[in-house]
Amino acid sequence: MRLYFYVLLLLLLHPIGNAADLEEGLSDLLSTDYQELAAFSKKLRACEVTEESFRLLFWEGLTKSFDFYKTSKKIHSTDIDRLIATELFSHTDLSHPFKKPEMRKTNLAKAFHLLNQFSGEWHGHWGPMNVHHFWLPVRQFNQAVSKKFTLVGFQSCFTGDGFGWNYLVKEGENITVLGFVYHFNDEGRISAKNPHYAYMNSNNQLTWVSDNHIYHEFICDSSHCFKTRHYVISGVKYEKQTQGLQSEYGFQTIYLPDNEDLPAFKHITLNK
């Protein structure tokens, strides 16, 4: 109950849109997603997130991720590309290679296709933790969130230690990918909130940016790597300094559709 009133107060004081104006179709889609995630995850059922608060948290996540994207903390895609290319791309400790990011504008159909590649169940290691992710299909929906921006799609997920959404937001012909994850603690309460945004590129890759991490993600179907399709996450912990981005360390993990013979989470020492 406390969670419900907190989110409602947040939306009243700082709306990106108006939760009361959520159209019935969007509410129905979120209800369907909640039921699917709750059926999948005992954690979600055990915590204080109800179907109603799930819908309100959806709106809070969009608000906070949008604010994070529009603040001065935003990092230009060329700086992200440069860090990945110089620190990670040719590193000898990578378990799985990847193509250099090649940024270009994308249309809505390509954005839907890219996000839908991640749909389904994924097993893997995140640091010392075993994780079991569940990404639902992208839902297409048009909802104005401001005079300039329209929500055109979203993707709900359970992330092993929490839940959240990817959001597709359109400004004119430009498509922006936003994300937000709520993390649980051991007592099953929401203990952390993580806004982020992503750059899409022509190699069907997503590069996510949070306030201190970069995650370069893609789905690989090559049987030369694993027998089944796999979800590759390569990343860097960074610090933003006046002279640019300073990397602290790197990592890579690979998720598989089943829970057998999972690759280890790999820490990568980067050149200083």
Image (spheres, rainbow, N blue to C red):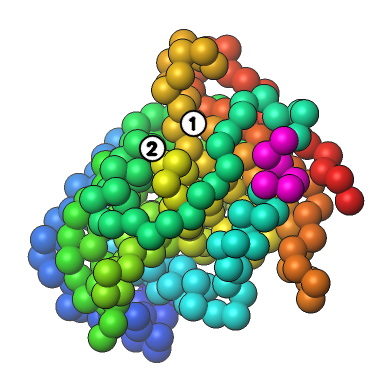
In front of the other: 225 or 69? 225
The x and y percentages for residue 181 are 48, 55
Q: Residue 26, labelled with which disc?
A: none
Query: In percent of the image, x 70 and y 29: which residue is there?
Result: 94
The amino acid type, in three-letter code, at marker 1 is Tyr
In front of the other: 22 or 243? 243
Q: Magenta segment range?
A: 85-90
| SS at badge 2 | loop
Compare marks 1 and 2 and give the one earlier in the sequence: 2
Please, is residue 116 above or below residue 150 in the view? above
Q: Residues within 10 Å of mark 1 (few under 14, many from 20)?
A: some
The x and y percentages for residue 82 are 67, 55
Q: CA distance from mark 1 to mark 2?
A: 8 Å
Query: In percent of the image, x 62 and y 39: which residue is there?
Result: 234
For the view shown, which residue lies furthest in the left direction? 24
Q: Which residue is mark 2?
A: 118
> Was residue 89 drawn as part of the magenta stretch in this picture?
yes
Please, is residue 79 above or below residue 35 in the view? below
Callout 1 touching callout 2 (CB < 8 Å): yes
Q: Is residue 263 left or right of residue 246?
A: left
The x and y percentages for residue 187 are 57, 48
Q: Quadrant of the N terminus?
A: bottom left
Q: Residues within 10 Å of mark 2 (few under 14, many from 20)?
A: many
The amino acid type, in three-letter code, at marker 2 is Phe
For the view shown, which residue lies furthest in the right direction? 272
Q: Which residue is mark 1?
A: 231
